[in-house]
Image (spheres, rainbow, N blue to C red):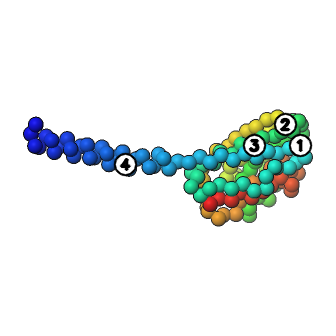
Amino acid sequence: MKKTTRNTLFAAALIGLNAFAFTAPAQAADKVCKLEISGNDLMQYDKKELTVAGDCTSVELTLHHPGKLPAATMGHNWVLSKTADATAVANDGLGAGLAANYVKADDKRVIAHTKVIGGGESTSVTFPTSQLQKGGDYTFQCTFPGHSALMKGKLIFG
């Protein structure tokens, strides 16, 4: 084999290894962190605080409703916003109604939300942590009418 051909093959192999080395960590960096919370027929979440590690790239939150009452009577959702926006998000959600899951359409203050579920149901939402700032002040709440006063808590990122 000629020296030139051997050098060309060696160079191509190095380029291929470098490309692999630089793409592999980017794929490995994606980290989905899973959280679960329940809301019952007594208008209570089972957790007042949820923590998301700073190395998570997205969050998959699952809401469970272990109660027996239907969504139209005692439905629950999970809505995340900055704490400063929480009251306005809940108030605007009232006007949106059950069909819109008590979340105003295209509300930019809402970081993530689930649909409204009734007893015996579960639902999930996945959202990127790029919407959160480490150490930011975030509130999750149920925006079903009258529930946000009791059903709320803090989300901690970082």
Q: Earlier in the sequence, mark 3 or mark 1?
A: 1
Q: Earlier in the sequence, mark 3 or mark 4?
A: 4
Q: Residue furthest left?
A: 2
Q: Residue at x 89, y 43 (%)?
A: 41
Residue 152 seen from this side: yes
Whether 62 is drawn above or below 141: the answer is above
Q: Which residue matches tag 4?
A: 21
Give the amino acid at mark 4.
Ala
**Mark 4 burial class by Cα count in 10 Å: few <14, some 14-19, many 20+:** few
> Pointer 2 and pointer 1: residues touching (CB < 8 Å)?
yes
Give the amino acid at mark 2.
Gly
Q: Which residue matches tag 3?
A: 63
> Pointer 2 and pointer 3: residues touching (CB < 8 Å)?
no
Q: Earlier in the sequence, mark 2 or mark 1?
A: 1
Numbered tag placed on residue 119 in the rendering: 2
Quarter of the image that includes the C terminus: bottom right
Q: Which residue matches tag 1?
A: 41
Q: Earlier in the sequence, mark 2 or mark 3?
A: 3
Q: Is residue 94 left or right of residue 24?
A: right
Question: What's the distance in space between the residues labelled 3 and 4, CA to CA?
Answer: 39 Å
**Mark 1 burial class by Cα count in 10 Å: few <14, some 14-19, many 20+:** some
Q: Is residue 141 left or right of residue 13?
A: right
Question: What's the distance in space between the residues labelled 4 and 1, CA to CA?
Answer: 52 Å
Give the amino acid at mark 1.
Asp
Question: What's the distance in space between the residues labelled 2 and 3, CA to CA?
Answer: 11 Å
Q: Secondary structure at mark 3?
A: strand
